Image (tube, rainbow, N blue to C red):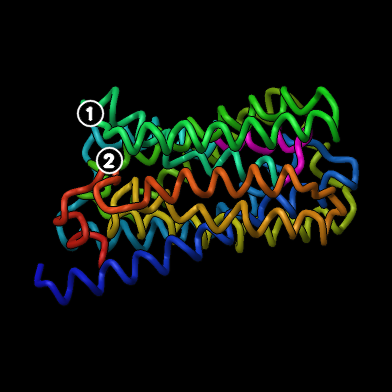
């Protein structure tokens, strides 16, 4: 790629990553609002995925046609990886995240998910034998110290259930970081939009199968209309758009750099949670949030990209 086209791809990737981070964050607010109508995490997740399914199916059909034209249809091995990524990245991660939101405020949920860059860095260390500089170890320590500070304060304000919720959300963060790190090969070969369309369809199937095993289908009907309206908004604005934006950003920036733009999420949710949901904000929570942001900022400096994609990956995702 020429320097000009590479620079343009990076600017586009930055805009997509930032937009995706903001929209992703808002899903926690919508889920919390749905919980006020007596539904639980599995119902919220099932409705979200069911409403988003037609969007991803349409995207999948379009991208399948484009892939056929350029000879980039998934192989049998690719389909196996797509199933793994769909279950790992969107089914498991979303299930743990929404479950955790039953126990923790949105500001803490987003702060834990904000550890994605540090988790991707550790995946790069253990799975890809990447060398980690002393500055990056410092950033890791600072980030996790900030999360612990906020968690302890939330334990004082909210109660012991915060520990369970925090563990669930951390599991969601690890699951999604694995998805980001493992998706690079398929993005390079298939393109980001084709991958995300099929992965989300797999994830939706997994969620609905889980729901049908655990609950009667009738439990999804006859709910207050507000639950369905919030689910539809969650599906379009906090699932379909940010997922496609984020995967396109990964294709242009690499997994580590794209993950770093989650910085916008915890900052916005600290105040949105207080404004929309009435959640408490304390000085210690603000200090802890600032500490975590500082740690991830250190990782965002040049040379801190943990699991980068080859530059050629942008060639297959720019369309």
Q: Nearer the viewer, residue 262 or 232?
A: 262
Any part of residue 87 in sight: no
What is the quadrant of residue 217 in the picture? top right
Q: Residue 49: x and y, percent?
A: 61, 47
Q: Nearer the viewer, residue 272 or 157?
A: 157
**At 70% from the left edge and 32% from the top edge, which residue is drawn?**
151
| Residue 95 painted magenta | yes
User: In the image, 21: left or right of 130?
Assistant: right
Q: Quadrant of the N terminus?
A: bottom left
Q: Residue 195: x and y, percent?
A: 34, 48
User: In the image, 85: left or right of 102?
Assistant: left
**For the residues bearing labels 1 and 2, Cβ distance under 8 angstroms:** yes
Q: Residue 294: x and y, percent?
A: 50, 48
State which region is magenta.
Answer: 93-106
Task: For label 1, count other residues whose C-alpha is less than 10 Å away and answer few (under 14), some (14-19) or many (20+).
Answer: few
Q: Which residue is mark 2?
A: 307
Name the element at disc 1.
loop
| Residue 247 painted magenta | no
Q: Main secondary structure of the magenta part?
A: helix
Q: Nearer the viewer, residue 71 or 33?
A: 33
Q: Which residue is mark 1?
A: 128
């Amino acid at each position: 790629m020429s320097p000009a086209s590479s620079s343009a791809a990076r600017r586009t990737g930055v805009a997509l990553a930032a937009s995706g981070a903001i929209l992703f964050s808002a899903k926690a607010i919508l889920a919390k609002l749905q919980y006020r109508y007596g539904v639980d995490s599995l119902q919220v997740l099932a409705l979200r995925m069911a409403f988003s399914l037609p969007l991803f199916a349409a995207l999948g059909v379009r991208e399948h046609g484009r892939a056929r034209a350029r000879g980039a249809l998934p192989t049998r091995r690719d389909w196996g990886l797509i199933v793994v990524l769909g279950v790992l990245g969107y089914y498991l991660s979303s299930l743990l995240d929404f479950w955790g939101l039953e126990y923790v405020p949105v500001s803490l949920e987003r702060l834990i998910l904000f550890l994605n860059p540090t988790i991707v860095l550790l995946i790069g260390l253990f799975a890809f034998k990447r060398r980690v500089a002393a500055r990056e170890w410092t950033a890791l320590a600072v980030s996790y110290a900030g999360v612990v500070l906020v968690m302890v304060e939330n334990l004082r304000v909210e109660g012991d259930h915060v520990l369970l919720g925090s563990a669930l959300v951390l599991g969601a963060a690890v699951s999604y970081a694995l998805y980001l790190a493992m998706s690079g090969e398929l993005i390079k070969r298939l393109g980001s939009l084709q991958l995300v369309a099929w992965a989300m369809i797999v994830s939706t199937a997994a969620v609905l199968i889980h729901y049908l095993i655990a609950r009667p289908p009738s439990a999804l009907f006859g709910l207050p209309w507000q639950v369905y309206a919030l689910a539809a908004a969650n599906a379009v604005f906090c699932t379909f758009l940010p997922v496609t934006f984020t995967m396109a950003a990964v294709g242009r920036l690499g997994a580590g750099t794209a993950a770093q733009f989650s910085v916008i999420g915890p900052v916005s949710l600290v105040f949105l949670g207080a404004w929309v949901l009435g959640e408490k904000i304390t000085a210690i929570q603000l200090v802890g949030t600032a500490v975590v942001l500082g740690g991830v900022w250190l990782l965002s400096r040049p040379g801190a990209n943990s699991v980068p994609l080859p530059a050629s990956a942008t060639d297959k995702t720019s369309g």
